[in-house]
Amino acid sequence: MVPSLIFLVFLSYTLLLFFISYVTSRKSTNRSYFIGNRQSPWPVVAYGMVGASLSGVTFISVPGWVRDSHFSYMMVVFGYIVGYFVITRFLLPLYYRLNLISIYSYLGQRFGFYTYKTGAFYFLLSRTIGASFRMFLVINVLQIFIFDFWGVPFWATVLMFIALITLYTYRGGIKTIVWTDMLQTTFMLASLVFTLYIIIDHLDLSLGQLITRVREAGYTEMIITDWRHDMFYLKQFFSGMFITIVMTGLDQDMMQKNLSCKTLKDAQKNMMTLGLLLVPVNLLFLFLGASLYIYATDFGISLPILSDDLFPTLAVHHFGPLAAIIFFVGLIAAAYSSADGAITALTTSFTIDILGQDKEEETSELKTKHIRYKTHFFISSLIILIIVLFREINDQAVISRLFTIAGYTYGPLLGLFAFGMFTKKALKDKFVPFVALLAPVLSYILSVNSEYLLNGYRFGFEILIVNGFLMFIGLYLIRRKL
């Protein structure tokens, strides 16, 4: 596959996004940047959020992960559905009732200044790390198959990629992203389906025969019954439920798109539609992963050391030029889909929650816009730094590392919102940051020593639940009477 052809595909796709940005960002205001003037059609939001939810991590990491986890990830996905129901039933009505732009301002209204800033800080920390990991996965593939060939250093590739995203989102914000996400979801899913077609054609099998091969190879195992295993099915299910609640329902990036819908009912329809769509889509990605391993076995192809490299290696070197182009279109779509929304949400949260630029008066519009522009570029610069550093330490599937870190950074948010919504207690506000620091530290100590303390039990992604519970208990201890 000629690197110049891949780069041409990348450039063409990027220009298409810039055209959409130009159309959607005309006469844009701070309100259209933050919540799209609450005019986004919910079917467009729901469909586009499929791509934003999947990102490059699902596109590359989930298929490769099948070797180690088989289809056990589906138990996490089934937990997603319950998580989306909780968001629909409890969180969205709260956000719409309070007419929020940043969801963390709820914590300020409920508890006070320090709690508000603590919640915003943990979102900024969580989303900056998470977005960087997602973008790293895709940029690294582009580096290996395009820019290494031309001798371009990795940091320069990262700079170019983030700069392009920054330029097409800094004006329109969420108003632009709602529509670019729809395009990117389409390309990502088309790439998935076409790749499966190529595999079936090369193996000279029917779809039914390939399904049989996958089942006979043992890849379809979903339920792991050993309670000590870190992929025990109940742990996976409840982890998926709480991962959705915190990484969607308590995440400004995902909620910002929901809050751009016209009404609460539209946002609720969007959320449940998204939850149901993710089940067959994730199942397809797992099926793709199993098919890739069968393909490699049948043709005697050596497997890469990192499972994340499986899909790109086969697509570029073994499936043919057209398949490689389709793969890169899907990959680029996945990268942009997760990156643009993250940068916009981080800009929104930092501008409103940290800098306090949430006035709606006409006199503050220009000032807020200038501050927003500076924040947008600052966030982009920070993500560039993290991606470059992450490349030096990565040695495992990115999806595993992503969910593990999320367990520690989103746990305090889970505890804060749960305490706010399910109790009527007030807090000694100034002590909240200390509790929010202590809960993840205790969770980490427990996780590291769990096999010794808990008779061989190993924590997986459910460390998020433990972290949130410890945060809740800590908040209860610093409660005060209203």
Image: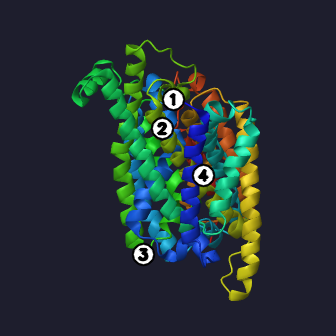
Three-letter code, disc 4: Ala
Q: Is there a contact, CB below 8 Å, between mark 1 and mark 2?
A: yes
Total numbered circles = 4
Q: Is there a contact, CB below 8 Å, between mark 3 and mark 4?
A: no
- Tell me the CA gap for discs 4 and 2: 18 Å
Quadrant position of the C terminus in the picture: bottom right
Q: Is residue 6 left or right of residue 324?
A: right
Q: Position of residue 237 (x, y in %)?
A: 41, 40
Q: Is there a contact, CB below 8 Å, between mark 1 and mark 3?
A: no
The numbered mark at residue 316 is 1
- Which of the pair 464/401 is nearer the observer? 401
Q: Is residue 8 left or right of residue 149?
A: left
Query: Residue at point 58% right, 56% down?
Result: 15
Of the image marks 1 and 3, the number of the one nearer the N terminus: 3
Q: Nearer the viewer, mark 4 or mark 2?
A: 2
Q: Nearer the viewer, mark 3 or mark 4?
A: 4
